[in-house]
Image (cartoon, coloured by chain):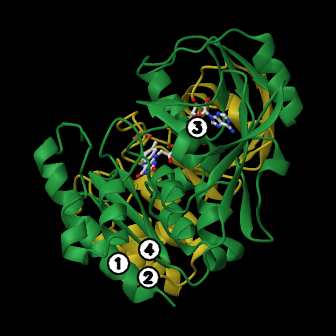
Chain colours: A green, B yellow
Amino acid sequence: MIPASFDYQRASSVDEAIGLLSGAGEDAKLLAGGHSLLPLMKLRLASPSLLVDIAGIQELSYVRQSGDHLAIGSLTRHADLSRSEAALHEAPLLAHVAGQIGDPQVRHRGTIGGSIAHGDPASDLPAACLALNASFVVASPRGERNIAAADFFRGFLETELASDEVLVEIIVPTAAGAGWSFQKFNRRAQDWAIVGVAAVSNGSTRIGLVNMGPTPVRAIGVEQALGQGASVTEAAQHASDGLDPPADLNASPEYRRHLATVLVGRALEEAAQKKA
Amino acid sequence: MKVSLTVNGTARSDDVEPRLLLVQYLREVVGLTGTNIGCDTSSCGACTIHVDGESVKSCTMLAVQAEGASITTIEGLASNGDMHPMQEAFRTHHGLQCGYCTPGMVMAATSLLAENASPTEAEVREGLEGNLCRCTGYHNIVKAVLAAAES
Ligand SMILES: Cc1cc2nc3c(=O)[nH]c(=O)nc-3n(C[C@H](O)[C@H](O)[C@H](O)COP(=O)(O)OP(=O)(O)OC[C@H]3O[C@@H](n4cnc5c(N)ncnc54)[C@H](O)[C@@H]3O)c2cc1C
Ligand code: FES
Ligand code: FES
């Protein structure tokens, strides 16, 4: 399957990428690892007129600890994040989740920035970012702004990003010693999660869900129940409160609701065990 | 558009359409047909090659994205007519039947060992989760990779 024709430019810096994007029409797209965008283009579900390839911007690939947070360059590949000492120590959930994505070939190409900017409810890293209370630094001709993960995902494959904005950095409050868990349920190796649950407990508990609505979502019902002193079993009953999980070939909405309850229960138990 | 890269140690430069997939470039422009196309949807791993030493599905990469990269295909593994130890291990342990998945399996397996020189059986199975085989049931493939890791 061959994508429709497009123009292709390489950007060697963030400024150059912003310049190329703002000089182009709405349907220009950034290309990072290409592991979400190219499959869509091959199926002709996306046909951008211009691809701005940012994969060569070396300075956007890093994982650094800086004070009370971890700063991750948007072009950091899943394979590098999963092996990063800083991430393994300061935000082990994130490193673990990066190591569970797809298969080794996918992790050699896919980037954290692409995963987040794509805004796919089936992606794993956005749910982890919700659980970790991460925020995203975004650059455009108007300067930089910081968007909380909780405010970033707007609709199916739709985010707060404007068409001339580049996601440059992911900021994750450090959570060394926090309890955490990632429960990814699928039926075949390599598959996307049918439902996934990322949980972090560090005083209070935050939970991000994979594939439980049109966007990556938080399990607010569970978080509130725990805040009011509910047991794990009671709180898990609220896993899909207010949510509208999708139906597809893998699962019905009812099945996803059931899975969410079971997986939230497991995640809370594991997070409690891991807490230092 | 011009793309300059190294394929199996030989530098080359070709004029390609930006939408040309790397797998098509390798098969149709370079003429290396060892890399197979199975699913064409990033699922089966038949098209696995190395980009700068790491396994990548070449049906999910544009040729122009390989600018400056060093590409290795199955044809580039043997040296001076001697099979690579991984190829040898697949032969010895019957790690193939029809052979369609084999170039991708071998490339994924060599990349796996470059990252983890002595994997456990479970690590081999997980490390090859991006590669599907319709014939062997995987058992002998895993045996071959473990044997190659030992040798
Ligand atoms: C076979 C297969 C299995 C997979 N399995 C999983 C899985 O189990 N879990 C999972 O979470 N993901 C999975 N993925 C998706 C994978 O993680 C993608 O790599 C990731 O979602 C997108 O990252 P990318 O760098 O490839 O982005 P690209 O495909 O290059 O880009 C995706 C989108 O984000 C935009 N974009 C990219 N970078 C930026 C930036 N810095 N600023 C603004 N916009 C940007 C692009 O314009 C595009 O719209 C799988 C993919 C494949 C092919
Ligand atoms: S042909 Fe590339 S993964 Fe199947
Ligand atoms: S040997 Fe036939 S597909 Fe693997």
Q: Are marks 4 and 3 on the same chain?
A: no
Q: Are marks 2 and 3 on the same chain?
A: no
**Is there CB contact under 8 Å for labels 2 and 3?**
no
Question: N-terminal of the two: label 2 or label 4?
Answer: 4
- Amino acid type for the residue under numbered disc 4: Ala
Point out the residue furthest to the front here: A228
Residue highlighted by disc 1: B143
Q: Nearer the viewer, mark 2 or mark 4?
A: 2
Residue B86 is left or right of residue A241, and the answer is: right
Distance from mark 3 CB to nearest ligand 1 atom below 8 Å: yes
Distance from Cα at disc 2 to Cα at disc 3: 42 Å
Front one among A275 and A25: A275
Chain letter of the residue carrying label 1: B
**Is there CB contact under 8 Å for labels 2 and 4?**
yes
Residue B24 is left or right of residue B3, and the answer is: left
At x 50% / y 50%, what residue is drawn?
Answer: A126
On the image, the x and y values in percent for residue A21 come to 76, 19
- Amino acid type for the residue under numbered disc 3: Ala
Residue highlighted by disc 2: B147
Height in image: B30 above or below A168? above
Question: N-terminal of the two: label 4 or label 1?
Answer: 4
Give the total number of marks visible in the rendering. 4
Residue highlighted by disc 3: A117
At x 67% / y 28%, what residue is drawn?
Answer: A30
Q: Are marks 2 and 4 on the same chain?
A: yes
- Amino acid type for the residue under numbered disc 2: Ala
Distance from Cα at disc 2 to Cα at disc 4: 6 Å
Residue B145 is left or right of residue A23, and the answer is: left
Chain letter of the residue carrying label 4: B
